[in-house]
C-alpha cells in the first residue's frame, strides 16, 4: 500500500461518518426544541420595558377612526372613539390573526373566525378566550403617544 492509498477513506467509513454526523445534528435540533419549550424567550409574553412612542398627530385621527401602528415590534390598533384614544394589540387571542377596525360598529373584528372586541379589547362575541391586551395612550401638545401596557 502506498501513501496515496492511505489518505483515501473507504465508502463504508465515509457512510459511518455521515450517519454519525446526521444523528448528532438531529439530536441537537431535538434538544434545542426542548430547551426553547422549557425556557421560552422572555420577550414572548413577558413584561417589556415601557417606552413612550409617538403614534401620530391628533388631527390625523378623527373620532370614529382607527389606524394600525407598531409599538415595540407589535402591531397595535390605535382608535379614537367618543370616550377618547385607545390602543390594543391587534393579535387575536384565539389563533393569532390580525383584527381589523369596523368603523360602522366601532368594534374590532377578527377576519378568521369572527371574534369581536370592543375598543378596550374586551371580547364581545366569538371564540376568542381572552381580551386583547390594552395599551396606555397619552395626548400631549396635539401628539398621541403609546406608553406601555395598561
Ligand atoms: S383567530 Fe381570531 S377568531 Fe380565530
Image: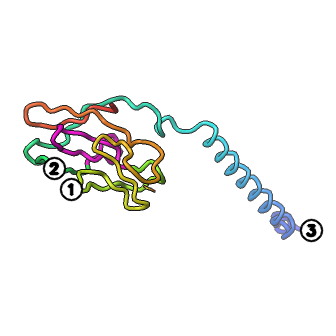
Q: Secondary structure at mark 3?
A: loop
Residue lying farthest bottom?
11
Closer to us: 33 or 129: 129
Q: How far across and how far down the image is residue 93, in percent?
A: 45, 47
Q: Residue at x 37, y 61 (%)?
A: 111
Q: Nearer the viewer, residue 143 or 102?
A: 102
The picture quadrant for ligand 1 comes to bottom left
Residue 3 in the figure: left or right of residue 124? right
Horizontal side of 35 relative to 65 (left or right) equals right
Q: Which secondary structure class fits the magenta region best? A: strand
Given residues 116 and 78, the one toward you in this image is 116
How far is the residue under mark 3 from the one under mark 2?
87 Å
Q: Kindly identify which residue carries mark 1.
A: 103
**Range shown magenta:** 69-90
Q: Quadrant of the N terminus?
A: bottom right
What is the count of numbered marks? 3
Whole-percent x, y for residue 56 in the image: 15, 43
Q: Position of residue 85 (x, y in %)?
A: 19, 39
Alpha carbon separation for disc pair 1 and 3: 85 Å
Residue displayed at 34% across by 48% down: 117
Amino acid at each position: 500500500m502506498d501513501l496515496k492509498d492511505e489518505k483515501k477513506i473507504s465508502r463504508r467509513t465515509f457512510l459511518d461518518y455521515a450517519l454519525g454526523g446526521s444523528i448528532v445534528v438531529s439530536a441537537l435540533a431535538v434538544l434545542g426544541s426542548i430547551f426553547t419549550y422549557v425556557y421560552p424567550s422572555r420577550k414572548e409574553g413577558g413584561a417589556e420595558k415601557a417606552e413612550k412612542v409617538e403614534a401620530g398627530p391628533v388631527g390625523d385621527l378623527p373620532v370614529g377612526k382607527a389606524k394600525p401602528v407598531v409599538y415595540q415590534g407589535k402591531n397595535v390598533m390605535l382608535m379614537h372613539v367618543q370616550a377618547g384614544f385607545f390602543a390594543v394589540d391587534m393579535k387575536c387571542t384565539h389563533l393569532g390573526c390580525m383584527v381589523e377596525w369596523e368603523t360602522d360598529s366601532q368594534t374590532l373584528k377578527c377576519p378568521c373566525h369572527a371574534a369581536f372586541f370592543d375598543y378596550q379589547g374586551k371580547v364581545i362575541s366569538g371564540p376568542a378566550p381572552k381580551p386583547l391586551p390594552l395599551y396606555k395612550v397619552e395626548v400631549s401638545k396635539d401628539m398621541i403617544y403609546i406608553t406601555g401596557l395598561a
